Image: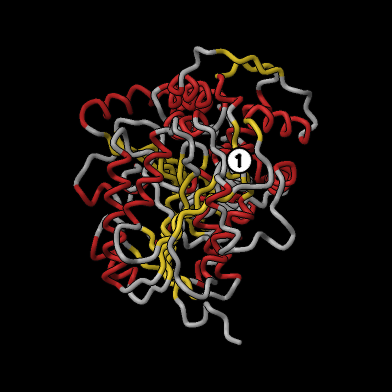
Amino acid sequence: MSSPAENRKYLITGASGYVGGRLVRTLVDENLDVRILVRDRNKVKGQPWASAVEISEGSADNRSDLDAALTGIHTAYYLLHSINLGANFHEIEAKMAHDFAEAAKAAGVLQIVYLGGIANDLNISKHLASRAQTGAQLAHTTVPVIELRAGIIIGSGSASFEMLRHLTHRLPIMTTPKWVMNRTHPIAIRDVLYYLKNTALLKDPISGTFDIGGPEVLTYADMMQKFAALSGLKKRLIIKVPVLTPGLSSLWIGLVTPVPTALARPLVGSLISEVVADPAKSIDAVIAPPPEGLTDVATAITLALSKITDHRVETRWSDATSPTAPWQKAQGDPEWAGEMVLRDHREVVTDISAQKIWRQIEGIGGEHGWFGSDFLWWGRGVLDRFVGGVGLRRGRRDPDYLRVGESLDFWRVEELEQGHRLKLYAEMVLPGKAWLEFKVTVEDGKTHVTQEATFNPRGLGGQLYWYAVSPFHLIVFPTMLRNIIKKAARDA
């Protein structure tokens, strides 16, 4: 008997995000015909599944791009969120979902699948209300929509897990807001992917809103204690205080964890509500639970920790960039536009092999640091957090290998030619746009290493900023290049 998925084509939006990137791999592993919609194909070219999917380049807020991406699609996965686009993010999300549904109907799409958040509490946050409104907008046409509503997703690289991990590790004694005693219904990322995959295999299109959660309901405080026990840490002392508002909680999380305040705010907002699945909205009658059963919290945490330890993190919360993120605006050489370009350019010629040099360059940042003057990098990261930036603590997905489009501390990998060239774009708060680029070439048996910092200032303030920090550049940049060479020599 043929599979229900035979001759179907699937579209995944949000393929560069945490869930989307893993869903692509999951469907590809099932030998399904997958197309993805991304703003820049270069951002996914480093993914192991990139050659196995059809890439449609365009924006979800452009109707012609949507029409092209949705043509010939049976099932479209809507995994787009706009929580970092300012105070009116809910309006942006609603319009995007409305336009997507209209385009899907026009293209003859037979099924839309949307991953939202559990929203059963009357005290619902603005973030969860927006997720529910997105589902309603997707369902306003005649195209059947399956809306899966999940609680906290536990998995290596998820924002919720990183928040839980760093709060528990760094604070043996915590003064916490009262929301830590609210009940939550966490679910492992593997179970989320199980349900998303099986929506692709349904025999006929269906409509409905379904809550998905793991086998346990517990408080956020309980989750922190479980995490501490599994990590070999002592039981955490949790002192509840009534004065920590969601805004203050977000600032606190932004200081303690790698998750920036802007992203922590909607996550905290969700925790104010009791996020527990409603049995009346169970999906069991449509998709049976996994044969081996749903993953309990302890197992989900253990799996996530093991993947982090073994450097097998597939996607991270920081991989996704919003449509107005600086990295999206950075493409191209500012010189083409006739804008001012300020540079710090350095070159070294050495007998050390290009391979040894490249190994150090590709491993830059994260736990390896920045090859000297790390106190200055740390200070710049603190300043960036203070003014609302991402700071240094995002780290990197893998300590040794990079992919185009992923975050690296407060940089993002914009271009990568394995063994030859690495170009990073600065996502720190700046009065302009900045890049850091490394090139490794071999000429006449010698290895030539080029390091160049480039700054495209915005107005007079940008120029003054560059000249103000130039004295630090005289310490940071030559030290970094010199230590890259020294470390490569020691390894050789």
The three-letter amino acid code for the residue at tag 1 is His
- Give the residue displayed 61% in from the left and 51% down from the top: 189
Q: Position of residue 435 (x, y in %)?
A: 39, 42
Q: Quadrant of residue 90?
A: top left
Examine the rendered structure and indicate whether residue 378 appears above or below residue 56.
above
Side (left or right) of 314 relative to 427: right
Between 441 and 141, which is closer to the camera in this rendering? 141
Marker count (numbered): 1
The residue drawn where x is 41% and y is 63% is 112
* Colour mode of the rendering: secondary structure
Relative placement, left or right, of 227 versus 118 is: right
Q: Is residue 107 above or below residue 234?
A: below
Above or below residue 334? Residue 455 is above
Residue 332: % across, % down: 30, 53
Identify the residue position indicated by label 1 in the image.
Answer: 185
| Secondary element at tag 1 | loop
